[in-house]
Amino acid sequence: MASDSHMLAPVCLIENTGGQLVANQEALEILSANKNPLVVVAIVGLYRTGKSYLMNKLAGKNKGFSIGSTVQSHTKGIWMWCVPHPKKPNYTLVLLDTEGLGDVEKGDKKNDTQIFALVILLSSIFVYNTMNKIDQRAIDLLHYVTELSNLLRKVSTPDLEGVEDATNLESFCPDFVWTLRDFYLTLEVDGQLITADEYLENSLRLKQGTDQNVQNFNLPRLCIKEFFPVRKCFTFDSPTHRKKLAQLETLPNDELELEFLEQVAAFCSYIFNHSKTKTLPGGIKVNGPQLKSLVLTYINAISRGDLPCMENSVLALAQIKNSEAVKKAIAHYDQQMGHKVQLPTETLQELLDLHRESEREAIEVFMKNSFKDMDQKFQKELETRLEAKKSDLHEQNMEASSHHCSALLRAIFDPLENEVMQGIYSKPGGHRLFIQKTELLKARYYWEPRKGMQAEKVLQEYLQSRQSTSDAILQIDLALTQRQKEIEEARMKAVAAKFEAQRLEAIQRYNQQMMVQREWLHQQRMRQIEMIKEYQLQQQQRALERRFQEKAENLNKEIEAEHRSLQNDVENLQRNAASQDDTCILL
């Protein structure tokens, strides 16, 4: 749509006729002609709470969307007003005003939630308009509808299924603005003043604990936080005296409360300056034809009955949340088993232990995310599915073991098969060598780890399939062995005869050598005898010479002794003679 042909007034985009939502062809044609990127602002809230007034202000008008002043709801279905974006050139601001929730004349809560869910999916900025304060009923309703919106998005655009990471979810989900009309509370906590944003975040704060009441309290808040990563809150005083509200469109600003005007200006400024372009996963900016396509896609899904049609919103939430809880638990189980299990496992007990551990964690995930699982219906469904997965894993484990063991046997025994083909074992004693090699390879197979529970069965089947080869080698071995025995016997006889001849020749040589040696020994003995005789003669001669010498020496000694004795006698005679001479002289 060209910038000079923007709409002068809103038109009905989706008509609510007899409880059926139908797209208005005129509005769809307007969208088809608009090729600009779109900023889509939608508002939802109870009827008679001033939603249309805020949307008119965003359009820069006092009139446009119908503002009712009676107990009867004015806006029916979803109305659209396309205006130039005041802050973004070549962008179009698409304003979506919805019929009020809880219209007693309609009496169809299912129709309310369909419109609520639809505008969440169509918008890039979603305004939730409630009265007075944030309460549990408003949080529960918002939670319920966000879950329905998420479900409607998935069933309407299955090609987007699986694109659930934080970046894509944040780009797809609208920014959230909670507007509190006729707000009368003081923004104060523990004596400290707080902002409207802090009031919103405090209202969405989680409680500590794990009991069911705490889980029921936290669940809607968690979902709202996840679905609306960007959140903002505005509070509005009452615009004027209650009796003047019927003329709100025509009242001049000086008859409206100044604080209310400032609050409306702040709201509009935020919407304009924090405009988020409507995008699809992958960062695709939505233009008019694409928004038209989304409108038709979602309405067709609603018409097919893809949204839960239940009067009890708690039951609807329970079904949605518990189904999601089962999916999350199964996904967690699959993830954990994928990380922990390495097929094949060595034993069945190993697989069962890993299953029980992951099953326990999966049930914990389910319990954490479940909501009012009456009679444990969904938990039993989860347990049934986990049991089926255990059976499937057991079969996969057995199959993986068979495949792995077969491949391992081929790798180990292929060299033996090649040797058989080369005829290495086609010889006498070949069967014994073949059996020895087979046992060696079996030991190597047993040594390999993580073969799984089919290890022995696959081995025996393999060996049985190769039994014919072993039998053939045995027959060849026996035939060749008999012939070899005959050849060996003849060879042994020839060897024995040769050995006997060699033995006799050796004996003869030995005898000759012994004769020569005896002769040599005889001559040696004779020579030794001669030498001994000569030695004995020499010894006898030496002995005679020694005896002669001794006798000569003894004789010399006797002569010398006799000589000395004679000499002594002479000396004595001489002394005696001298003595006698002396005596004679004296006399």
Image: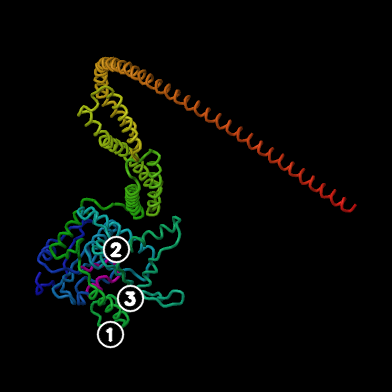
**For the residues bearing labels 3 and 1, Cβ distance under 8 angstroms:** no
Tag 1: amino acid: Asp
The N terminus is located in which quarter?
bottom left
Give the structural element (helix, strand or loop) at label 2: loop
Q: 469 above or below 197? A: above
- Residue at 72% x, 39% y is 562
From this viewpoint, is residue 285 visible? yes
- Secondary structure of the residue carrying tag 3 is loop
Counting from the top left corner in percent of width and height, residue 555 is at 66, 36
- The residue type indicated by label 2 comes to Leu
The residue type indicated by label 3 comes to: Phe
Spatial CA distance of label 3 from label 1 is: 17 Å
Toward the viewer: 232 or 480?
Answer: 480
- Looking at the rendered structure, which numbered label has been put on residue 254? 1
Name the side, left or right, on which 304 lies relative to 259: left
Q: Which residue is mark 2?
A: 101
